[in-house]
Image: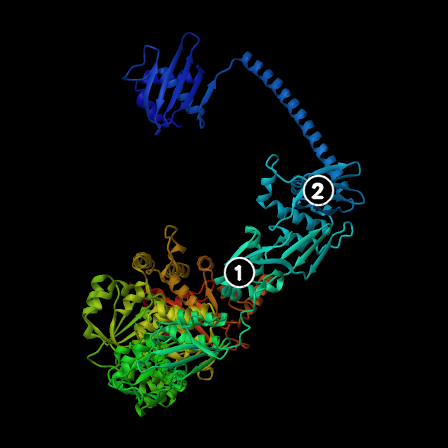
Amino acid sequence: MLVTDKELKSIVSDTRNLNIGRNYWQSGYVKKIKITADRNNHYLIKGVVDNDSYQNDCQITVDENNKIIDYQCDCFWCDDISACGHIAAVLFKVQELSPDYFPFIFEEKTNDENAFLQQLMLFQEKQKQARINSELSLTRNLINNYKEDKINQFSLISQSKKDIEVQIITSDYYALKFRVGNEKKYAIKNITKFIEAIEDNKLVKYGKQLEFVHTLNAFSEDALKIIELMKYCLNNQKYYEFYPYFGGFKNEIEIDSTNIDYIYETLSQLENTNFHLNFYEIDRLIALNIIEQDDYYQIELEDFNGICGKKDIYLIEDNTIELIKLDNDGKALQFIKNCLNKDELLLSKKDLNDFNKYLFNDIKKYFDINGVNFSDSKTEAEVLTLYGDIDEYEQVKFYLECKQNNQIFYSFDHDGFNTSMDFDLIENYLKEMSDVIDYNEHCVYLNLDNEKTYQFLNQGLPFLANYCEIMVSDALRKIGQKSQFSITVGVSIENDLLAIDIDSIDIPSQELTDVLNAYRRKKKFHRLKSGKLLYLESDELEELDNLMNDYHLSANMIEDGHLDMNVYRAFSIDNKADNSNHLVFNRSDVFKNVIDNFKNTKKQTFALSNHYQKILRDYQKFGYQWLRLITSYGFGGVLADDMGLGKTLQIIALLDECRDVNKTSLVVCPSSLLLNWHDEICRFSPNLKCKCVHGNLTKRKKAISAFDEADVLITTYDYMRRDYKLYEDYEFEFVILDEAQYIKNPKTKNASAVKSLNSKHRFALTGTPIENSLAELWSIFDFLMPDYLFNYHYFQGTYETPIVKNQDEDKQLELKKLISPFILRRNKRDVLKELPDKIEKTMLLEFSEEESKLYLANLMQVNKELQEKMHYEKVDRIVVLAMLTRLRQICCEPRLLYDNILHISSKLEGCLELIRNFQGNNQKVLLFSSFTSMLDLISDELEKQQISYYKLTGATSKEKRHQLVEQFQNDDTTVFLISLKAGGTGLNLTAAEAVIHFDPWWNMSAQNQATDRAYRIGQKNVVTVYKLVMKNSVEEKILELQNKKKNLADTFVENNEGNITSMSTEEIINLFSI
């Protein structure tokens, strides 16, 4: 809570009252203050002001915003117009105390009161200390007691391990009892408490000779197994019903069907010699009495005293448990349980045959039968035969025949015969699989259009052969075998389309669509119009269907055996033809010529003017021929050459040689490359007229509307995102995407914008290997040739997921074959012999609108200062260098001069983009700057983007320099930031393949020395050197002067002793001109 002076004066408006209040406060008349807060954050201040003559009580209310909303005092001078001096005194005191917790209480004490309080506090402190000492003593005693207990327990734990003895109790029921100890053993009187003692590590005393801590380590290995047995039985809730009055086991565990298996398995494996139990597995028949009555049999067990386990029977006598093994299916055990549950079973005489067939024949070997002995139902010799055929209505027909004692009967007609279990099972199986049962003909019919029929033929008949003889007709036998069709696929190129003609001597071309549709509906047969029935299980149809599915083609697209596809499928179709196993492909001469042209690109001879013959290198001429070949067939392609190999120049040659005065092409590139494209076209093409679509919206609209006036329009991805609707009415001859990874995410506006453009030909340029990102690959191809890699959902499931997640090499090879005809990639090592040792590039960058205003403002100020200095006979070198440095710093990064700028500069943004490209190619970069503060800003951005780097400046020690160089040469760090002073000479950094001069050095020899840190003996790779220069700036003018005056550079390098007076007045004025 804080009451401001302004608020205080607003209620104590009378100056006299205000001065009196200040005097009361300063004189110490405010004796008591109590402040409380309510739920609404309102503060109630109660104060007492005593000036030795009068005592006044005050009350003030302050709201949550520290505004005084009410005040009261019992004096005569407090009214609605102005609060009194007492109120003012209390508020001055509150300001002095600055309370920050509530309730808050202040009370002024007299000297006597203060002395008394000090004595009281001293007495209370002594009492407090005495209480603490007493508590500490009690705690120490408690610790000692626990310590003594632990020592005693430890000594008890260290004693010999305890055994547990097991005894079997046999009386009216069977049970286990337990004793624990070593030489002398004591009975476990309560099993539940025994287990709880183990779980709680309790100390338990059994008698004079046995007391120990019940930890698991205290028991022998066999005892631990018995403890697990106890726990198993404890978990059976049934046992608690026997002892409801104490809630657990006492001294025994009853043996019954729920635990007998576990008891036998556990105890029979123990090797403890401290107790004597016997376990045997015996072959003993179980006594069974069968008594014949008038119309039924009475079945009962004789004197059975065994315990039923999960599958077997156990007999217990004295200290012996005997195991009688029964069948694994549990039939015998279930029969015994049924007998035990009802004391006896009654069997109708008419059910005798089924009783024998389905139950007793399998289990009677386990019983000693007294009384009536059932005969074996399979004693009568029989022969079972299953017959099958196809009738005239194309229905599959089956019937079962049984020969028994020179008699014959059939399925569904066997009254009066004693059928076997095998007969019954086969008959029931036929019922289950059939579509129709004909009781008159004693057979079943199966529909050939039913999948279940083929399951029966292919799987059911081999299974039934184990139970009967199978006799089927030749017609039926062929149904299970695949058909063989002669199918030929003709491939040709007509009217810029891939023409597919499918022909078969077995399937009329007019009916091919119906046959394929039937196959796709999983039909097994199809009847032709001629009446011929085709069995559709066929390798040829399967391959043809797979071919259609691979290209997302519908059978309805086929007209009289013919369909058309996009011509870019030619290479894929050719590959499938080479790998076909069942289809015969006939490829036309035109088709073969297209494939051969792509396989032998070096043989292409598209016209190339002398102008480009002179300036293109051999690998660039090859690239040009490849671009022309792609264009000639209406395909799209990816020029993926390594950085620095001249992708831009190859595209310029293509645009120039294919130039049509009535057609315009479009280049879309990153912002940092906009001016580069313009300058490169102007530099290399004598014919192409180009315009940049940039600036504000009005300028961009004007440039686009002048569509017909330019051969090439150049814009950026950023502008394209905003302007794509402005291009809707225009059709371009070529659309070129530079740094095509900008559309790697198909959901971005970048991707959707460029894909909406209308064009005849499309190319994508990227120096980053696109196979590093399959999603990027799909998006680029979706721009080049929509649907070539199908929709993304299909592509992801068919290629991306299997390749990325499952490392599916077959899918990887399949995808590579799909895309390889449309990608041309060369790296520097491939064409090293044709390259110069060092490639130098000047990268022109454009100021943002804000940067441009800032630069022009500083340039105008420099010009004003320069005009004032020019009347001197000699130019002040220091002054000119200072002016130049200021402008250079703005070109690099305005933040070097201005603290209130938060975003990075255009040059730094372009530099980071360049570094990311090198990082994507796993290439190392040296970055030089003459400003160490600039290196600091660059390093900050590298850290944000998680790009690894080292930094070397003049402050780096010799030892550290050596260490950094060694690390950069041998590890995978991407960037080495180096200042001019520190790294211009004396470093060997041949691991780098690229050099960036962030602020190009005007001393050419110094710049070359820096470049030579990478380009020197030991360098095995071509070095690409980039100079970053801001368009329309002092940087660009310095480069122009360098070409005119080689020694000019030495004049402007910091700490260079060159004489600036060697420049003419005109040159200096031009350097700083607007």
**What residue occupies the far front of the structure in this picture?**
294
Q: Nearer the viewer, residue 197 or 532?
A: 532
Q: Helix, strand, or loop for circle 2? A: loop
Q: Is residue 236 visible?
A: yes
Residue 1047 seen in the figure: no
Which sits in the foreground, 441 or 133? Answer: 441
Instruction: Residue at 53%, 73% (x, y): give it.
Output: 990
Provide the residue designation for mark 2.
214
Report x, y in % for residue 1063. Answer: 37, 68
Q: Residue at x 41, y 14 (%)?
A: 49
| Quarter of the rendering containing residue 31 | top left
Q: Could you tell which of marks 1 and 2 lies nearer the N-terminus? A: 2
Task: Point out the image quarter for the N terminus.
Answer: top left
For disc 1, the neighbor class at 10 Å (few under 14, some 14 to 19, many from 20) is some
Q: Residue 351 at x, y = what percent?
A: 49, 62
Residue sitting nearer the eye, 187 or 701: 187
Looking at the picture, the colour scheme in use is rainbow
Residue furthest top as drawn? 53
Looking at the image, is 326 positioned above or below residue 1026? above
User: Residue 958 placed where, x, y %?
Assistant: 59, 62
The CA span between labels 1 and 2 is 72 Å
Find residue 954 and name its label.
1
Which label was assigned to residue 460? none
Q: Amino acid at mark 2?
A: His
Horizontally, is 528 left or right of 432 in the view? left
Q: Position of residue 336 (x, y in %)?
A: 58, 56
